[in-house]
Image (spheres, rainbow, N blue to C red):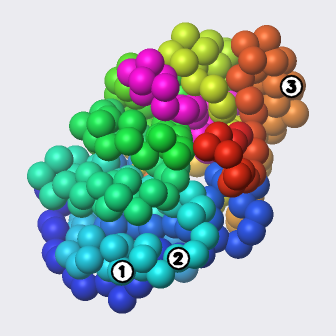
Amino acid sequence: MTRTREIQAKVLLSHIRQPDTWFGLKYNMNLYRGCQHGCIYCDSRSECYQIEDFDGEVLIKANAIALLRKELASKRVKGPIGLGSMNDSYMPLEREVNLTGRALRVIAEFGFPVHVMTKSDLVLRDLDTLCEINARFAAISFTITTADDELGRKLEPRASLVSDRFRAMRVLADHGIRTGISMMPILPFIEDTEENIRQIVEKAHENGASYIIPWFGMSLRDRQRAYYYRKLDLLFPGLRQRYEQAYGHQYGCAAPNADRLSSVFNKLCGQFGIATRMVQYEPVKSTQMSFF
Ligand code: SF4
């Protein structure tokens, strides 16, 4: 069971270096430190982030709502705010704490656009607020790296089932909210099959996704690598040795067939009219705003 502890944050919103060609963000915020989802590949375990007990304890930024209100009041540029880079804003404890839900209410009040990245269908709890924010702009990206629930359960043990993420995507799309997939990481020797990529794109299409942001590989470093390799030994015996042989101590670990996967992916997305990258956010003078 995860322990929780309240902390007081000094600053909430960070500025993202422009242009952010990956996610189209101007600001980013994390309402928690640590994450309950337990994804075996999570980069937030890396030493540089200095989160000592990433899986065992979640820190709750108790003053986040007051801080957000204060910081938004002083921002001149109403650029997209990202949620979900270092933890999942909709991890299970959010159900009771409701920090994300309350933060979105403040964002709606101040009229900022948002881009939420999550692996949870709990995002639907805030559907009404997201619809309100969407009068300006809201985008919800589900991280999906396999279409297979059973494999997803192994890799992301406490996140929503992949099929539930697709169902949530359908609901958001039906409410006119732009939704899509952050298809990363694609784990070498586990998820890097044409079949997997094909299934993800097809299900994305069926469920109203308008974009998929791909990365055919993963990153590995220090504590994150050690944790991932321990899990490989447990879940996929023999695979660690394959990684060691292929990547040594490399940080960037592209899938060996990344080019082939990329070509299959681009072709399928072209057929379905799904965008493969985010277009930079450009505020326009009329009431219409474009983001992708
Ligand atoms: S949801 Fe994101 S932050 Fe949480 S464990 Fe998984 S990869 Fe890490």
Distance in Å between CA atoms under marks 2 and 3: 41 Å
Decide which of tag 2 and tag 3 comes sooner along the chain. 2
Decide which of tag 2 and tag 1 comes sooner along the chain. 1
Distance in Å between CA atoms under marks 1 and 3: 46 Å
Residue located beneath label 2 in the image: 75
Q: Residue at x 47, y 40 (%)?
A: 134
Question: Could you tell me if residue 223 is visible in this image?
Answer: no
Instruction: Tell me the amino acid under the disc marked 2.
Output: Lys
Label 3 secondary element: helix
Residue located beneath label 1 in the image: 70
Label 1 secondary element: helix
Decide which of tag 1 and tag 3 comes sooner along the chain. 1
98 part of magenta stretch? no
- Is ligand 1 within 8 Å of the beta carbon of the residue shown at mark 3? no
**Quarter placement of the N terminus:** bottom left
The percent coordinates of residue 63 (x first, y second) are: 23, 78
